[in-house]
Image: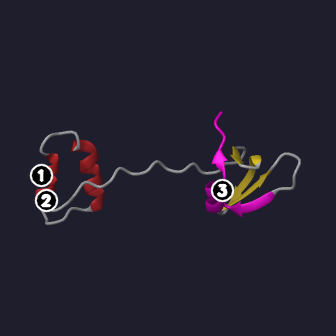
Amino acid sequence: MSASLDPALQAKLARRFSGQSGFQSWLARQGGTPAPAPKAAAPEPTVGSHWSDEDGPVRVMAVVEGYVVARRKGAMPFSSSARDFAAAFKPVEG
């Protein structure tokens, strides 16, 4: 094998063999270290989904080309980039 492994292959090997004895030493001999487990994907706003922040709940009306149009009950709709929206609001469970 080569002195360094492809990061994607390292991650795949780490997921598959991480619980087996000797895997860490084998991987070290190959010149790599196990990749950290991937983070869970952040929820993305979808049409009709409900989100909330410290001011109260909002409902997503549309998601278009990376932007979210949402509104609070009884208020005018507002728009935000999907990234900013997901950072500022948390999805409502149930």
Say which label, 2 or 3, has the lower sequence index.
2
Question: Residue 54 placed where, x, y %?
Answer: 72, 49
Residue 92 in the image, given as x and y percentages of width and height: 66, 40
Q: CA distance from mark 1 to mark 2?
A: 6 Å
* Residue located 21% across and 43% down the image: 17
Which amino acid type is shown beneath numbered disc 1?
Trp
Look at the image and give the residue range highlighted in magenta. Answer: 78-94
* Amino acid type of the residue tagged 3 in the rendering: Ala
For marks 1 and 3, give the one nearer the viewer.
Answer: 3
Q: Nearer the viewer, residue 79 or 6?
A: 79
Farthest top residue? 94
x and y, in percent, of residue 86 in the image: 62, 55
Task: Please say if the residues under marks 1 and 3 sit with CB atoms less than 8 Å apart.
Answer: no
Q: Residues within 10 Å of mark 3 (few under 14, many from 20)?
A: few
For label 1, count other residues whose C-alpha is less than 10 Å away and answer few (under 14), some (14-19) or many (20+).
few
- The secondary structure type at the circle numbered 1 is helix
55 or 34: nearer the viewer? 55
Residue at 13% x, 59% y is 30
How far is disc 1 from disc 3 in space, using C-alphas?
43 Å
